[in-house]
Amino acid sequence: MDRREFIKKAAAGTGSLTALSMYEMFSPERLQAAASSGGMSVGEALEILAKGKEKNVAPAIRPEIRDNPRAVFLIETHVDARRDDSGHFTEAVPQLAAEGKRVAGELFVKGSRKGGSTFFKPNFTYVPEHCYNRTTGVYSSPDFIGGMADHLRDIGNTNIMAGEGPTNAENHRHGGVYEGFDAHGIPMIEAGYAKFADFRKNEVNWAKPYGSLIWKRIPYFRPILDKDTFLVDVSSLKCHLTGLTTLTVKNLQGCVPVGYGQFCTPWDSLEHNARRAGIDFDRDFQTDFQPRVEASFRKHLAAGFKRWDHTGSYKRYQDKGGWEAYRKMKKDPKALDEFMKDVGELMQHEMWLQRGLDNAAVLMPKMNIIEGIIGLDGEELNRDKIGADQLCNMVIAGMSPFEVDAVGCYYMGQDPREIWFTRVAKERGLGENDPSKIKIYWIRNGEIVPLKDLSEIKRHPLGLNWARLKDPDERLFW
């Protein structure tokens, strides 16, 4: 079956979506051959969603959650599984789906608004070959998301999609995404195009962030930011070499197309990379972003951010004359290359967190969920088999990604008052980062119960390994 035939069948009724698998839609050979994105395109997905709106009933957030938009809700899960020979919890697949359905039932109720669609933004980043398993801690669980979709359909929400931007369909297929989604009839948008010019104008929404040091406007692949899209952010639970932790805020950068979406681009590379990619830099970015970002970096250095210049790149930059020397040679590639030798990834963490916070503040998904049933110790991709998947059995949810991530960091054994992005989120007035000042509730057997003391949370330490092969036993906790 080719794509056009699939679209015709899917548009004929919502039942067709669940009856067809991704393998029927696109052959494995075609996916294997895909250089960038071999799955469903944005335009094709929009056609299907447009046809499905008439019969759709948008979900509603449970009133107790809706009325506490800055609160965080903890749901313990009960997955009981053993590691297989590959180190994965493969036998947990049906339990993950069941828990997804149960958790969705605790968060969402039947709505009254007709039309629109629901879009799941999972964390489906790159996975190395030894992590090709749909229960890997590198990913948010596709089976958990599938279970959530099952509950939403039960309450009338039939027009559901998921999608990802940064990585390609071949990697998602090998990682088990399609295998997990097929069982629950969730179509997957593959928006990891090779270049921004591959997006058609009607496939992108634009937004202007407020008070950004870097952006003038941010693009999103649709249906993200469509007015009738119910956006659900489902992240994984793990550490990250740039963000320290990678939870709901960081997961949202996958909503931004190629060329704009590499938030961790170092300070000195952003403009060059954007122009090389054919992006109108002056239109979409602050042309004076560099002194703005450097001033913020210096403020955070003076505030004592832990390991803020841990590679020494900023000190080497200063030793070479800093901004005054840099700006004089900005337009001389040869001189600039010489100046930047041995400087390293300059102000990369400041760049990432500012762009990440801007992005999350624009999107503000209806629900932000850390799927922490299976977490990952070490670093975000488990590239060198340092650390391992951990059965953590916790889901953390709420309407504000900033408070959700603060509690998620705390659960991981980290101090969100020190984690860089949660600290700056509070500094910018986006959300609280002190767990003792956040309203936290348990949801147990349908009942919402206030957390009386942080000691009630049995934390599950997940530490960051920066050293990787140099020191595989290293685990950093802020």
Image: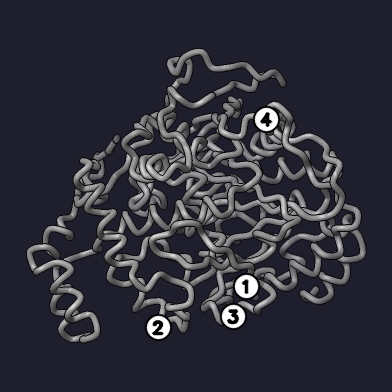
> Mark 1 or mark 2: which comes first in sequence?
1
Q: In the rendered view of the protein, which quadrant contains the C terminus?
A: top left
Q: For the residue carrying disc 2, how many other residues have a C-alpha within 10 Å: few (<14), some (14-19), or many (20+)?
A: few
Which residue does the image show at 67% across and 30% down from the upper left?
Answer: 67
> In the rendered image, which residue does mark 4 sit on?
67
Q: What is the spatial separation of the Cα atoms under label 3 and label 1, in whole angstroms?
A: 13 Å
Q: Position of residue 424 (x, y in %)?
A: 37, 44
Left or right: residue 201 versus residue 170 is right
Q: Which mark is residue 198?
A: 3
Instruction: Tell me which label, 4 or 1, sits earlier in the chain.
Output: 1
Q: Residue at label 1?
A: 38
Circle 2 is placed at which residue position?
276
- Taking depth in this image into account, of 371 and 25 the one nearest to the observer is 371
**Front position in the image: 235 or 308:** 308
Q: Earlier in the sequence, mark 2 or mark 3?
A: 3
**Callout 3 secondary element:** helix
Residue 314 coordinates in the image, percent (x, y) = 17, 59
